[in-house]
Image (cartoon, rainbow, N blue to C red):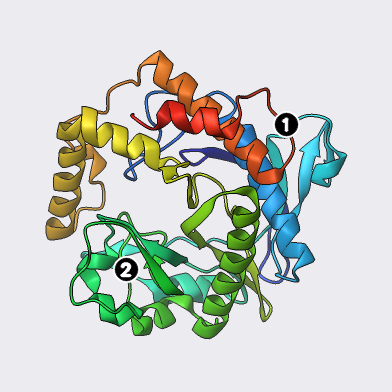
Amino acid sequence: MTSVKDFRVEEEPTATDLGRGRFVFSDRYSVFDWGEMPDHVPNKGASLCLMGAYNFELLDVNHVPTHYLGVVEDGEVKELGECESPPTEMAIELTQVPGLPHEDGAYDYDAYHEAAGDNYLIPLEIVFRNTVPVGSSLRRRGEPADYGLDADEWPDEAVSLPEPVVEFSTKYEEQDRYLSREEADDIAGKVDLDRLEELALAVNHVLTERAEKAGFDHEDGKIECLYHDGTVKVGDVVGTFDENRFSYGGQQVSKEVVRQYYKRVQPEWVEAVKDAKAEAIETGEPNWRGNCAVEPEHLPADIVEALADLYCAGTNAYVDHDWFDAPAIEDAVARVRDL
């Protein structure tokens, strides 16, 4: 189980062969790496499953290799178009995920790869960015000119990049951290980093094109990949309102809405999370949540309802099919604009 979806193994992967399993999408959500939050958002799981399946099938048409096998309805694996109602389960190929030893404040990636062999989940997140919003960590890690922008300082508003930027961050460390290309190359193991960047740009291109057609702006996102016997495939789930940042008419249509709500309504929790993470980095203690002095509060019922409508309406618009009984995307966006 993760903070947002459950994981079922049907056939274990081996040192040489991929296995088979399922993602079971829940209505849980997570922000600021907290894990499961106090509330559930109705139909969120079905929304993410639908968007993820739709995007995987788009990637297949565009010859991008993935671990996707289909969605599950009535116990049968199907293509999305064969379903009669919104699915909540996705069939996938499985690879090995060895343990990542952590001793004396350091992670042992050599041990990870020694156990992984030629069949493993690459312990990286490959991040792609089309825009740089206000507050983005990219602004702290580089100057505008580093990313092709003709400016001496970062402006006070979001900026569109002339070309997408690809970055690499850790996946299995207690706190995500961005990596130099040399660090990422070491962590990737046998996989060529250029191949990972190529896949990320291909996924970004497909998602951005689809988003444009549906009236969305695709701002940023990430992929995770598996390596099996010389082949690299896109894994996990891609292009949902949790994995990626989308906006519609200038309004965020993603869990960024919830992030901004907590920043406004419960800033003391957001600050406590930040402090706990910083302390964990200094001390080398991986369990920062256990040292966080403040817990997140419940969301009001009307906000949970507005978020549910946003996920459902956004999915209907993105996949161009009314899977959910939801308001028009314009109405759902207007309702959350002032949260």
Q: Is residue 131 above or below residue 320?
A: below
Rate crowding at label 1 as few (under 14), some (14 to 19) or many (20 or more) other CA atoms within 10 Å. Answer: some
Q: Of helix, strand and loop, which one carries label 1?
A: loop
Quarter where residue 74 is shown: top right
- Relative to residue 7, is residue 4 drawn left or right? left
Q: Which residue is mark 2?
A: 178
Question: What residue is rendered at 42% in x and 46% in y?
Answer: 250
Q: Which labelled disc corresponds to residue 228?
A: none
- Relative to residue 61, is residue 283 drawn left or right? left
- Name the mark nearer the viewer: 1 or 2: 1
Q: CA distance from mark 1 to mark 2?
A: 37 Å
Whether residue 166 is visible, yes or no, is no
Indicate the amino acid at tag 1.
Trp
**For the residues bearing labels 1 and 2, Cβ distance under 8 angstroms:** no
Question: What residue is rendered at 40% in x and 33% in y?
Answer: 36
Q: Position of residue 261 (x, y in %)?
A: 30, 32
Indicate the amino acid at tag 2.
Tyr
Question: What residue is rendered at 43% in x and 65% in y?
Answer: 129
Compare marks 1 and 2 and give the one earlier in the sequence: 2
Quarter where residue 147 is shown: bottom left
Q: Which residue is mark 1?
A: 323
Image quadrant containing the C terminus: top left
Q: Of helix, strand and loop, which one carries label 2?
A: loop
Question: What residue is rendered at 63% in x and 62% in y?
Answer: 209
